[in-house]
Amino acid sequence: MSTPKSFSLFLALRYLKPKRTFLSIITLISILGVTLGVMVLILVISVMTGFEQELQQKVIGFDAHVVVSNGSVLEDWTSIQEEAHKIPGVVAVAPFAMGPVLVQHNNKRMAPKIRGIDPDKEREVTDIKKYIIAGEYDLDGDKTVIGSELARQLDATVGDKITVFSPGNLDNVINELDRIEKEGGAADAAALRQMILPMDLEVTGIFESGRYMYDSEFLIVPLHIGQEVYDLGGAVHGLAIRTADPFRAEEVKDALNQILVEPAHALTWIDLNKQIFDAIRMERHVMFFILMFIILVAAFGIMNTLITVTVQKTREIGIMKALGAQTLQIIGVFLAQGVVVGVFGTLTGLLTGISLVQYRNEVSAWLTYTLGIEVFPASVYQFSKIPAQIVPSDVALICVSAFFICSIAALIPAFFAARLDPVKALRYE
């Protein structure tokens, strides 16, 4: 004798696989809807999580964990450096000078940011050296290391010399022009020419961080070049600090702000990129709820299927109830149909979603080749490849949510089928 559970499951499978077709079209569409929803959710959430984690790695690798500046020129940076070393959690401190410049090579001009660093101290703060893809990390003398995208735009390679024009002494140039204009001193043209005379730097290395913004906008030079370009003398624009744990940089920032004199202040790498990280987190949460509607649409398909089955099988339901079928058995028949559709849809969506995440860059390249448009432009997303990170808890939440929604969708028609009066069901049969 069959148990109530096996009876309900047996009948549910018979209804899902009618005699004339292997699988009803409506049921197939419902399964595909659940599959599509789960697949897209896994793909989107994994990619957005990968974006956040990859961005954190790129920022931590290229930027300092904590930056001290005053928005202008930091004159007493040596004393701040000494105080910073006394703070628990501080591993290394390095001065830097940074700002926009005009760069020229082969009649091509760009306006990147120059970053003057002390190579020995900077090596302890950031991991720029590991991003070198051509040449070497050599900043001894009038040399520079540039980003791969900047090198491509300037058509520059290792060994080439690029010309750098500085905006740092623009005020001096304007003042000198005003003086010459008033005094008419044509002989002072030589002094003026000396002010605007550019400098030639040899490209010794090309780095590629994988983040478009860094690779296209940064020109790394020795600290004395940065100070000369901006006429800083012995001053700098700020201090870069490495902490023992980048995710506890906030503690170091608070300790620094207690000893710094305004307008000098400290900011963490999270503060400097707060808008980007907040935008990614918000978009991930919003996309989760938006894409969950795909599964809800599939759930309506399941409900429609079961309501249709209820109408078509009215006579059979009446006969089963007349023969003594229990209410829970009737509910179990329709609930089992929704569960089966949910299980199949969730499993196929899980497999296809994980497969797409694994081969996301190959799929992107194929779409770019097929459609003739760049699906994932690095200039927009700041990554050369699509990052992704599968988080088991996120995948579990997606699968459980899909299964739960499908089961809930099956309860409504199951409830109405169970309430069917066998006398009314068989009256006109």
Image (cartoon, grey):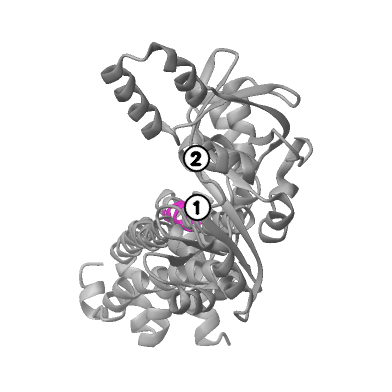
Q: Residue at coordinates 24% horizontally, 80% vertically from top-left?
A: 421
In this figure, which residue is indicated by the disc labeled 2? Answer: 230
Q: Nearer the viewer, residue 291 or 387?
A: 387
Q: Position of residue 245 (x, y in %)?
A: 63, 73
- Quarter residue 3 falls in: bottom right
Q: Residue at coordinates 76% horizontally, 40% vertically from top-left?
A: 140
Residue 325 showing in the rendered view = no
- Quarter residue 205 falls in: top right
Instruction: Check whether the beta carbons of the residues at disc 1 and disc 2 lie within 8 A of each other.
Output: yes
The amino acid sitting under disc 1 is His
Residue lying furthest right in this view? 136
Residue 326 showing in the rendered view = yes
Q: Helix or strand or loop: what does disc 2 sit on? A: loop
In the displayed structure, would residue 233 be above or below residue 90? above
Query: Which span is picked out in magenta?
Result: 30-38
Predominant SS of the magenta segment: helix
The amino acid sitting under disc 2 is Tyr
Q: Is residue 34 magenta?
A: yes
In this figure, which residue is indicated by the disc labeled 1? Answer: 237
Q: Position of residue 208 (x, y in %)?
A: 66, 40
